[in-house]
Amino acid sequence: MKPSTAYRQYHPKWYRTRVSTLWWSRRWSYLKFMLRELSSVFVAFYVVILLLQLHALRGGPEAYLEFQEWLKDPLLVVLNGISFLFVLFHAVTWFNLTPKAMVVRLRGKRLPNLLVAAPNYAAWLAISGLIVFLLMRQG
Amino acid sequence: MANRSNEPLLWALFSGGGVAAAFLIPILLFLYGLAFPLGWLQSPGYERTLELVQHPLVRLGLFLLCFLSLFHWAHRFRFTLYDGLQIKHLNPAINLFCYGGAVTGTVVAAYLLWTLP
């Protein structure tokens, strides 16, 4: 049986334009995309901090005190400050995805993006408030 | 069944982690990373923190936060390297590093939360 397609041993290469490795640095919207993707590194960084905190908590009062002192290290404060900005960027871009992913219509009219994203921000505020309340409550 | 991709599952974990991280990490990082160390707010001490974390719902919540956030990182970071730096020839190593790291972190989180006094 003869094969229905003839294969050439030396297939000519398809033409593809080369994309520079730093393609995302050329335009603000591309850079924003890369920064958004990079925010995931800081999400993981926080999880590591949280795991260290749990580890210290398991170690008893002294270990926990040591952990709290460690967090006061200027280097760590700066690192946490940068992480906070990135995590904030992640949260805002994530909440603003809702209107991009779904179109909400009310009486045939499309709801503005801000209104579709609003419930996310309300829930964010409520959850953050609850955490502050739980942590700061006396007794 | 043979060719079923596990991409949808990974994407679901990425998405779930995105939600968990967006809602919970900013305030937690603000408090523990900035407000407490810099003395803007009085940090709850060992006793109070332990009491809070011992609550089953808090334990479960923290576990889910670690688990989902780590898989969120794994998925997103994998594609950051893929799209941003166009590292394609190292794909198996990168996948192992990302998802392996996420699995390890999840196991550590489960162990710590489970064995907490």
Image (tube, rainbow, N blue to C red):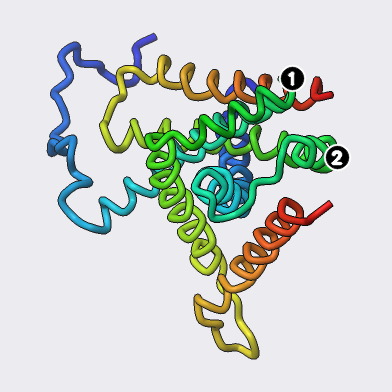
Secondary structure, mark 1, is helix
Residue B79: x and y in percent read 40, 35
Residues under labels 1 and 2: Cα distance? 16 Å
* Letter of the chain that mark 2 sits on in the rendering: B
Q: Quadrant of residue A42?
A: top left
Q: With A94 as the anchor, is B50 left or right in this view?
A: right
Q: Look at mark 2 in the image and give the residue it sits on.
A: B55
Q: Look at mark 1 in the image and give the residue it sits on.
A: B111
Q: Which residue is at the front of the view, A54 or B62?
A: A54
**Residue type marked 2:** His
Secondary structure, mark 2, is loop
Q: Which residue is at the front of the view, A103 or B22?
A: B22
Residue at (53% x, 37% y) in the render: A46
Q: With A116 as the anchor, is A135 left or right in this view?
A: right
Q: With B36 as the anchor, is A86 left or right in this view?
A: left
* Quadrant the N terminus of chain A occupies: top left
Mark number, residue A86: none
